[in-house]
Image (cartoon, helix red, strand yellow):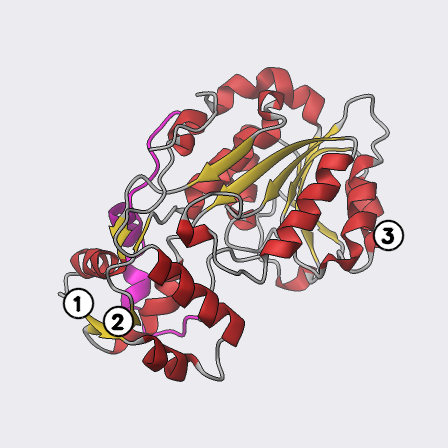
Amino acid sequence: MQVGIGVCERLEDHDLTRARTGAVLVTGATGRVGRLVVDELLPAGVPVRALTRRPNRAALPAAAEIVVGDFNAPASLDAALEGVGAVFLVWTAPVDTAAAVIARLAAHTSDERRRVVYLSAPHQTPHPFFQQPNPLRGLHVEVERLLAAAALDVVVLRPGMFASNALHWWAPQIRSGDVVRWPYGAAETAPVDERDIAAVATRALLDGRHAGGDYVLTGPESLSQAAQVRAIGDAIGRPLRFDELSPDEFRRETAGTWPGSVVEMLLGAWRATLGRPAFVTSTVQEIIGSPPRTFYQWAADNAAAFADAGPTPTRPWANDR
């Protein structure tokens, strides 16, 4: 197990840093992690601004100030950044405008450097699961380079496989039967609950002691994909069977609905990790002071979503932006 570099703390410990932080701008505020960061910040008494391109569809808490902005139009961020001391950054656009956006983040009128917590990926982690060709790798590398060169206090978060991928990938099959058809059942990952990612992000936003931190976030245990399916079956009270697909069968079943490059990246990542446990860190526990949620906990908390007959959008990769 890799030991992360962190500080155990509680939200009430942030009083000294809150006054310096000012308002917090959350980008990607309607996404899987950003929405939870908003929920974490509000009880801490922090003024929260939630950035969105479509405010009429945001469905965010009334206590959050909804501001309109678009990374594709960097000047649209100027009003949203006024009085902001910290930013949760989820890059949601082509990389072309990243330099102009990050220059605006660094143009802070206060004497304090602005704090930026960037939601990246573990592309630097030397585990084969994270070293396969990835269409997002180049984007993260460039954004991180620009952030490091700017006058900003930067924290980089690198979550691994999101636990909620199980919902997006497998729920449609589970709702219609007791079999999940999927490749590489023996491939092990350490799914991380997005609530734990949001909790870490909140501490990094509010506490300057994390400035310069670079944190890989995972769940607490390595589980095969077949074991994850069994855990969902336990949570919903129905035994589920994992039906192994060959890579070619998976390619055929996802043709026309998933980008081919993502399919090949996932197949390569699962194949590369066969025979070895997933990469697991203790960073979540060290930073928030409590153990990360297990996949079994996540499955129990989301059992109703696997039984609900409503549609679930499929997302081929872990980090919803």
Q: Which residue is located at x 23 percent, y 72 percent?
A: 244
Q: Nearer the viewer, residue 7 or 3?
A: 3
Which element type, helix, strand or loop, lies under badge 3?
Answer: helix
Mark 3 belongs to which amino acid?
Ala
Mark 1 belongs to which amino acid?
Leu
Look at the image and say whether residue 31 sits in the magenta stretch.
Answer: no
For residue 174, the mark is 2
Q: Which residue is located at x 47 percent, y 38 percent?
A: 216
Residue 177, located in which quarter of the rendered image?
A: bottom left
For residue 240, the mark is 1
Mark 2 belongs to which amino acid?
Ile
Residue 50 visible in the displayed image: no
Quadrant (top left/top right/bottom left/bottom right) for the N terminus? top left
Asked if the residue at tag 2 contacts the one at tag 1, i.e. Cβ–Cβ closer than 8 Å, the answer is yes
The span from disc 1 to disc 2 (Cα, nearest Å) is: 8 Å
The span from disc 3 to disc 2 (Cα, nearest Å) is: 45 Å
Residue density around tag 1, few if under 14, some if 14–19, many if 20 or more, within 10 Å: some
